[in-house]
Amino acid sequence: MILIFLFYSLSMAAGAAAGDLRDLVGKADHIIMLRHARAPGVGDPPNFKLGDCSTQRNLSQVGREHAARIGKRLRAADLATTNVYSSQWCRCLETARYLAVGSVVELPELNSFFRTPELEKKCAAALRAWIASADLSRPAVLVTHQVNITALTGIFPAEGEMIVLRQEPGKVVVLARFPVQ
C-alpha cells in the first residue's frame, strides 16, 4: 500500500504542467535540483581528476543546447537571477554556466559518489544539512548527478531533468518534475 501511494505521489509530481514552473520558482524555501545535461557515457574514466576536464566525461553539444534551453525555461518562469550551486565535476559546472541565471558557486556537497556508493548515506546527510542551513529566501538551483538526486529524493532523473523541492523542517518534499525539452 505504501509503495502504491509513493508511486502515485511521484506520478503526480511527474505530471506537472510547464506553467507550474513559474508558480514554483517564485517561492521561498524552494530548490530546483537539476541533473547535469547530456554527457555521453556512464561514470568517469579511470584517470579522472577533479578540476581537469580533459580526464572527465563532459557535456556533448546536445548537452550544451539542453542546458541553454533549461536556462531559457527558468528565465521565462521569472527566475532570471538566483543562487546557482554546482558539483565540482566539469559537466555540472558547464551545465550551471549555460543556464545563465546567476553566478555559479561550487558546492562539494553536490559532488558525485558514483564510484564510492558506500558514501551514499554520508553524502545525502551532508546535502540535507546544507539545504537545512541554506538561505532559501529565493529558490536555489542545484546542479548535480543522478546518484545525489536519487539518494535525496528516491527519483532516478534523466539528464537535464529538473526536480522542484520544498525545504520543510527536517526534510525536503518533491513538488514537481520537469523533463528536459
Image (tube, rainbow, N blue to C red):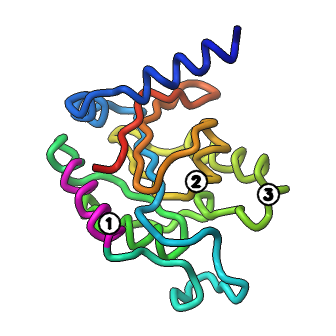
The mark found on residue 146 in the picture is: 2
Amino acid beneath label 3: Pro
Q: Which residues are magenta?
A: 62-73
Residue 117's label in the rendered image is: 3
The three-letter code of the residue at mark 2 reads Gln
Q: Residue at x 46, y 30 (%)?
A: 166
Residue 98 percent coordinates (x, y): 29, 68
Determine whether the residue tagged by mark 3 lies in a helix, strand or loop: helix
Q: Amino acid at mark 1?
A: Ser
Between residues 153 and 82, which one lies in front from this camera angle? 153
Q: Residue shown at 46%/34% (left/top)?
A: 165
Q: Can you say whether 53 is above or below 103 in the image?
A: below
- Disc 3 versus disc 1: nearer the observer: 3
Q: Secondary structure at mark 1?
A: loop
Up the image or down, 155 lies above or below 67; here it is: above
Query: To which residue does mark 1 refer?
Result: 103
Q: Does the stretch in magenta take in 65?
A: yes
Could you tell which of marks 2 and 1 lies nearer the N-terminus?
Answer: 1
Nearer-the-camera pick, 122 or 16: 16
Whole-angstrom CA distance, mark 3 to mark 2, is 12 Å
Q: Residue at x 37, y 44 (%)?
A: 179
Magenta residues: mostly which secondary structure? helix
